[in-house]
Amino acid sequence: MKETVLTWLNRLLVADVFLVLLAFFWFAAAVIGRSIGVPLGFDLWYKLWQPLFNPAIGILFLGAILSWLINKLSQKSSPNSPEN
């Protein structure tokens, strides 16, 4: 059961990383485009910041901390695992 939860948590985190990276590259391109006068969707990006990208960053951090915590707790409960 724990392995299944960790597998799905890691899959969610991988997808979330790609969403956050996409948002960053879109933001960088939109800012550069806006500075040279080419519309590359900065206004749309800004509208999506609060409802989509901001929670995605929060989920990424929460998932990473949760994954670390689950791994630490499983290391402490398993007597044969090496201590780090």
Image (cartoon, grey):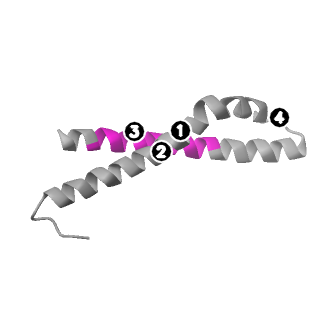
User: Mark 4 or mark 3, which is nearer the start of the sequence?
Assistant: 3
- Neighbours of disc 3 within 10 Å: few (<14), some (14-19), many (20+): some
Give the main secondary structure of the magenta stretch: helix
Q: Label for residue 60?
A: 2
Q: Quadrant of the C terminus?
A: bottom left
Q: Give how far apart the Cα atoms at labels 2 and 1 are.
A: 6 Å
Answer with mark 2 or mark 3, whichever residue precedes in sequence.
Answer: 3
Instruction: State which region is magenta.
Output: 6-23
Inter-mark Cα distance, 1 to 3:
11 Å
Where, quadrant-wise, is the N terminus in this rendering? top left
Cα–Cα span, label 1 and label 4:
25 Å
Task: Label 4: state its secondary structure.
Answer: loop
Label count reads 4
Q: Quadrant of residue 80?
A: bottom left
* Residue, disc 3: 12
Mark 1 and mark 3 residues within 8 Å of each other at the beta carbon = no
Q: Nearer the viewer, mark 1 or mark 4?
A: 1
For label 4, count other residues whose C-alpha is less than 10 Å away and answer few (under 14), some (14-19) or many (20+).
Answer: some
Nearest the viewer among 10 and 35 is 10
Circle 4 residue: 39
Q: As drawn, is 76 to the left or to the right of 21? A: left
Residue 18 drawn above or below residue 81? above
> Residue 10, image x and y in percent?
35, 45
Kind of residue indicated by mark 4: Pro
CB within 8 Å, label 2 to label 1: yes
Q: Residues within 10 Å of mark 2 (few under 14, many from 20)?
A: some
As drawn, the label of residue 56 is: 1
